[in-house]
Image (cartoon, helix red, strand yellow):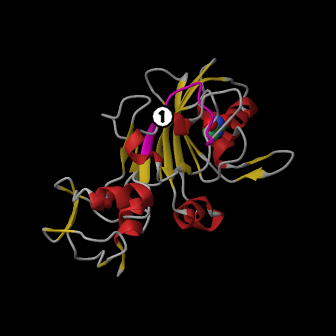
């Protein structure tokens, strides 16, 4: 059980003060009866709470998929550049979502946002060993030996990259897919530099078994479905 004003301010953009005003105006109902007090107790698991006739479902956490465009920082704020949170639709803003991990400013594709710290922690944990799949375009063709170089892992100044998978497009060897299970700074770009090629375009297409939704336009956000969350055991 919880207070009606808490239920509504957690689940919507209404503040507790807004909820008080709405209750005064008889705009809030609980199980079909107008609510008399904003501090009345409701059962968030079964009571039907409506504002202006529209049912509001209780929830504390939000899980969003963004198809990140280039030019945005994976951050919640920045004094100079646009940030991915700017792309979150108004209806989800009050949840204060933040990005799970990072993509470079010039990288596109799958980025998750949430306000659930435990979910973020779980996905970022090295223990989880979650692979991330990227599509990359190179400034020179990849060759079959590069696959072995990736598969052997690579040593960098501040870390050793675990064995990674490189797939070369048979029709155009400048197009490759890379799978890594870490996410160190510029990792894909640095691994490609090691094989003597520069990445000219980079897009993340999957995190573990979650694929970027092909129908989600660049710059758009949608909620993860329960089936998608279940892919992470959530
Ligand atoms: N590797 C990179 O080099 N850049 C990214 O944005 C993600 C992985």
In this rendering, does residue 167 appear at all?
Answer: no
Q: Is residue 153 left or right of residue 172?
A: right
What's the residue at 44%, 55% (across, down)? 15
Quarter of the N terminus within the rendering = bottom left
Residue 211 in view, yes or no: yes
Quadrant location of the C terminus in the rendered image: bottom left
Report the residue that reaches farthest toward the top: 139
What residue appears at the point 64 percent right and 48 percent down from the top-left corner? 151
Q: Would residue 69 be counted in the magenta stretch?
A: yes
Q: Nearer the viewer, residue 96 or 172?
A: 96
Residue 76: x %, y % from top left: 61, 43
Instruction: Tell me the residue at 51%/28% (across/down).
Output: 69
Instruction: Please rate how many residues cluster around mark 1, counting C-alpha atoms within 10 Å: few if below 14, some from 14 to 19, many from 20.
Output: some
**In the figure, residue 124 lies in which quadrant?**
bottom right
Look at the magenta stretch and give its main secondary structure. Answer: loop
Is 212 left or right of 151, judged from the image as shown?
A: left
Q: Point out the quarter of the image occupied by ligand 1.
A: top right
Residue for point 35% across, 40% down = 213
Which residues, given as a range, are shown in magenta?
A: 65-76
Say if 10 sits above or below 79 in the image.
below
Q: Nearer the viewer, residue 13 or 58?
A: 13
The residue at which mark 1 appears reads as 87
- Above or below, comparing residue 46 to residue 234 in the picture: below
Secondary-structure class at tag 1: helix
């Amino acid at each position: 059980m919880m207070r009606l004003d808490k239920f509504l301010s957690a689940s919507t953009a209404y503040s507790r003060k807004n909820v008080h005003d709405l209750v005064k105006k008889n705009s809030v109902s609980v199980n079909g009866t107008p609510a008399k007090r904003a501090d009345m107790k409701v059962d968030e698991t079964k009571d039907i709470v409506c504002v202006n006739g529209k049912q509001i479902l209780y929830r504390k956490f939000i899980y969003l998929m963004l198809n990140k465009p280039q030019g945005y920082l994976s951050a919640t704020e920045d004094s100079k550049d646009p940030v991915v949170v700017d792309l979150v639709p108004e209806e989800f803003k009050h949840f204060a979502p933040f990005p799970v991990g990072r993509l470079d400013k010039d990288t596109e594709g799958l980025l998750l946002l949430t306000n659930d710290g435990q979910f973020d922690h779980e996905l970022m944990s090295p223990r989880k060993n979650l692979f991330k799949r990227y599509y990359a375009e190179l400034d020179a063709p990849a060759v079959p030996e590069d696959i072995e170089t990736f598969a052997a892992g690579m040593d960098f100044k501040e870390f050793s990259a675990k064995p990674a998978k490189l797939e070369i497009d048979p029709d155009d060897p400048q197009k490759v897919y890379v799978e890594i299970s870490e996410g160190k700074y510029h990792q894909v770009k640095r691994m490609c530099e090691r094989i003597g090629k520069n990445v000219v375009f980079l897009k993340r297409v999957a995190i573990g078994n979650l694929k970027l939704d092909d129908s989600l336009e660049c710059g758009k956000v949608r909620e993860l479905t329960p089936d998608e969350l279940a892919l992470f055991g959530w």
